[in-house]
Image (tube, rainbow, N blue to C red):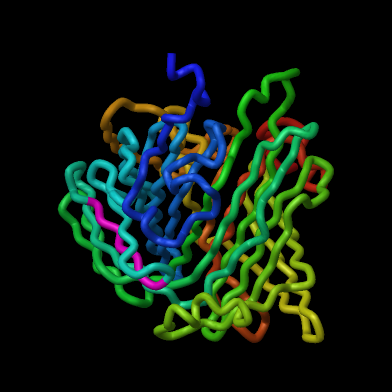
Amino acid sequence: RWWTTRPWNWWVVEVLHPADDLPLHPTPAPLLHPMSDSPGLYDRYFHNGFSADGSLFFAVALGVYPNRQVMDASFSVVVDGVQHNVRASRRCSTDRTNTAVGGIAVTVVDPMLEHRVTVDGSQEIAADLVWRAGSPVIEEPRFTRLVDGRPTLDYTRITQFGSWSGWIEMDGTRVEIGPDTLGCRDRSWGVRGGAGLAGPASVPQFHWLWVPTVFDDLCTHVAVNEDGDGRAWHRSGAITARLGSPSLDEVLDDSRVRRTTRSSVEVVWSPGTRWMSSATVRHEQWRDDPIEVEYTPVLRFQMSGIGYLHPEWGHGSWHGEAAETRDAIVLADVDPADPTMVHVQQVCRASTGDRSGVGVFEQLVIGPHAPSGFMGLTDGAA
């Protein structure tokens, strides 16, 4: 009985990938071996694009969920007050370098410098867009959140500014996208949502603000998470110069990123909603004058369109071997108390007094938040 003299798992091997031949391993395991058994394990791309006057906004998300065997993607564009959304989902194979889901693909042409987004038109929305870097990469401090000692969030995010070129075609009408179309992207990976967190029922609480902003000469950024009392469990801010046609060394040079000593956000909420009507961000700097930015919204984008909080097409949900869908959101008809619609990005005019720019002000505020006067799940401002 030879097998009884060997460890029970002596014969177990992990799935290998060609990238295992490169010196990239952060652990002794092959690259495809999940770091956690949490169903919340993920790896995601997010990009948006916008005109300074708010006449155009589009966004794309593509995520991998190894423990759910799902890869999904979505693309949304706002035209004349209507947000048009296409989504796709498929089984996630071991070849994660294939970042195409249905008719939507995100391709890393040149890491940290150039990405390409394509939509094939099978649902009457097509696009061929190239994003090029215009700033260094900003690595945000690691997001770690424990609830009663149990991990619910543990992930890393990078944010980077750039510009777009290409085109979008919807229902036969084509829009050319020039390099004056700005955009920012984030890239995040880790765990969102812990496993086995059943317990007493409570009102969900999450307060999240993410504000990348572009001026002629510089970019500013702030990210804040607060608990229901208003205490920040994550806060980061950064200022960096805009770059023309940067090299890889330039975008990875962290010395080009000035970390703020503190970045604070004050929000005035639109009555009856959890959507911002105006805001002030103050960036304090070591041995330099603070930068204070005022924000005024000009366009609202519902993150539900690309899967965030969507009741059916939420990120990582299983739709079979392959599935696609299209729908639309009439922005004027959205109920601000709908829990699936509280998560928004707003294109904003941004001003420091001597600078004018454009920012994207993301908000996901659900559950109690005492400084804002929110007591329930989605009650609006007074």
Q: Whole-percent x and y of residue 153?
A: 65, 42
Identified at 52% across, 53% down, the residue is: 188
| Snapshot quadrant of residue 3 | top left
Is residue 99 at least partly visible in the picture?
Answer: yes
Which one is in front, 17 or 180? 17
Which one is in front, 36 or 144? 36
| Snapshot quadrant of residue 199 | top right
**Quadrant in the picture for the N terminus:** top left
**Quadrant in the picture for the C terminus:** top right
Is residue 356 at least partly visible in the picture?
Answer: no
Q: How many marks?
A: 0
Please tell me whether residue 80 belongs to the stretch shown in magenta. no
| Residue 255 appears left or right of 43 | right
Which one is in front, 315 or 253? 253
Identified at 60% across, 65% down, the residue is: 139
Which one is in front, 374 or 258? 258
Magenta part of the chain? 113-119
Identified at 67% across, 82% down, the residue is: 353
Q: Whole-percent x and y of residue 288?
A: 78, 86
Is residue 157 depicted above or below 66 in this figure?
Answer: below
Is residue 60 depicted above or below 50 in this figure?
Answer: above
Is residue 165 depicted above or below 154 in this figure?
Answer: below
| Residue 323 appears left or right of 310 | left
